[in-house]
Image: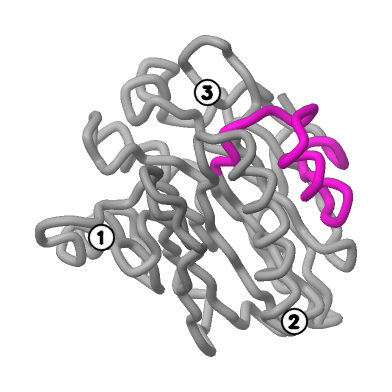
Amino acid sequence: MDDLPGSVTEPDGSAVIRVLSYNIRSLRDDRAALVRVIRACAPDLVLIQEAPRFFRWRKAAVRLADATDLTYVTGGATATGPMILSGLRAHVERTEDSLMPRTPGLHQRGFAAAVLRIGGARLAAVSTHLSLSPAERYVQAGLVLDRVASLGEPHVVLGGDFNEPPERRGFARIAAELQDGHVVKPWGGDITNMRPPFQRIDAVFATRSVDVLGCGVPHGLPGVSDADLRSASDHFPVLAALRVPA
């Protein structure tokens, strides 16, 4: 597997950044393995799903950030699970967490969102986690696109657990408007769900103004075993390298 480009600020002010989207299952698995995986990915941004959201959730979020040499940006309980962490290259301009309409009997869903500057580039980032209900997922896919547009930024990255593969209606609705990183520039593995049916249900999307340099599941990371990837969570992470214009 070819190496994914590393983080760099280019002479024209554009920035190559590494974005990790990761469902961490509320830190219920092997935390030491999770830390090894995140650190080995060397991300500038981590778009998390299923972050801790109950008792002392902020402390758990900060501990994870500290252990991975990152900074807590926003989300967690305030977004019902989605959360954003960033590296020291990122300057946070604003955060905008929000909730989706709730369907009685189903889990509340939301967005963690932030606008950041990295190098000479300005980027909005969104993390989300869609419903287990197919009908609700399709509606939420439209809300995802509305949320991306409402940030008012030309360059946006979206990471999430979409709870369905690309051929289903909700995922396809998002992919019709945004670039699906793994389709544009496939890199690494594609299956993200470790439970049957083994599918690609996690993804990194970007607006068409962003240049996708590679995107996929990062197997073969230095210092990280396959056992680490499998014990860190019940999802594999998705790592993308993106060039964001100045």
> What is the magenta range?
161-185
Q: Are marks 3 and 2 in contact (CB under 8 Å)?
A: no
- Give the distance between the C-alpha atoms of the residues marked 1 and 2, in whole angstroms: 27 Å
Q: Residues within 10 Å of mark 3 (few under 14, many from 20)?
A: many
Residue 30 coordinates in the image, percent (x, y) = 23, 30
Residue furthest to the bottom in view is: 93
Toward the viewer: 198 or 231? 198
Residue assigned mark 3: 193
Q: Is residue 42 left or right of residue 124?
A: left
Say which amino acid is labelled 3: Asn
| SS label for mark 2 | loop
Question: Which residue shows up at 63% across the image and 19% down it?
Answer: 199
Question: Which residue shows up at 59% across the image and 44% down it?
Answer: 136
Q: Quadrant of the N terminus?
A: top right
Residue assigned mark 2: 153
Residue assigned mark 1: 61
Please tell me whether residue 205 is drawn above or below residue 182 in the rendered image.
below
Residue 66 coordinates in the image, percent (x, y) = 25, 62
Q: Earlier in the sequence, mark 1 or mark 2?
A: 1
The structure's colour scheme is one colour
